[in-house]
Amino acid sequence: MVRNLLSAFLLPVLCLTLTAQEATPAETEALVKEAIAFAKASGKEAAFKEITKVGGRFHRHGGELYVFVYDLDGKVVAHGQGAGKVGVNQFKAKDPDGVEFVQDRIKLAKTKGKGWHDYKYVNPKDGKKEPKTSYIEVWDNLIFGAGIYKK
C-alpha cells in the first residue's frame, strides 16, 4: 500500500523531470539522422510534410528541438517551425549579431558534409535571442539539421 502511494506521488515528479531535461548534442544529431532515414524510407515529400508538421515526430522538448531542411542555395524546403518558412530563401539571413548563419551552414555542408555551427536565434519557448548550435548533415543535395540552445 505504501509502495503504491509512493509510486503515485513519485511518478509525476519523475515525468516532470524527464520532460524538463534540455536537449543534448547527441539527441540533436540522432534526430537529424532519424529525419534522413525517414526521407530515405518514405520519400522526400513525406519527410518534408512530417518535418514541417508542428508537434510531429521530428519535434522534441516542447518545440525547442526540431528539424529543418534547406537546399544548397539557402531555400527552406521543410521547417519544424511551420509551413510559413517553407519556400523562403534564407541565403542572406543574419542572426542578431549580423552573422550570415545560413551561408555558414551552406559552407559547412559543401566543405565537410556534416558538422556543428554556432549562431544566435529566437528561442520559441521564451522569445529571447540566444546562442544556438546546430548539427547539419547533407543527404541528396539537401541540408538536414536541428539545433539546440547553449545554456
Image (cartoon, grey):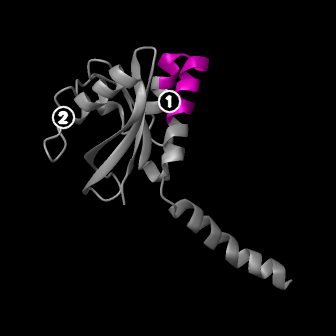
Whole-percent x, y for residue 55 in the image: 48, 43
Whole-percent x, y for residue 20 in the image: 51, 63
The magenta stretch is: 32-47
Query: Residue tagged by mark 1?
Result: 50
Which amino acid type is shown beneath numbered disc 2?
Answer: Glu
> Which residue: 81% across, 78% down?
4
Instruction: Mark 2 vs mark 1: give the one in front.
Output: 2
Which amino acid type is shown beneath numbered disc 1?
Answer: Glu
Whether residue 57 is visible here, answered yes or no, is no
Q: Secondary structure at mark 2?
A: loop
Is 86 left, or right, of 145 in this rendering? left
Whether residue 103 is visible here, answered yes or no, is yes
> Which residue: 52% across, 61% down?
21
Query: Is residue 100 highlighted in magenta?
Result: no
Rendered position, 145 above or below 60:
above
| For marks 2 and 1 on the same chain, the one whose residue lies earlier in the sequence | 1
Which secondary structure is most common in the magenta stretch? helix
The span from disc 2 to disc 1 (Cα, nearest Å) is: 27 Å
Query: Is residue 40 highlighted in magenta?
Result: yes
Point out the image quarter for the C terminus. bottom left
Query: Residue tagged by mark 2?
Result: 100
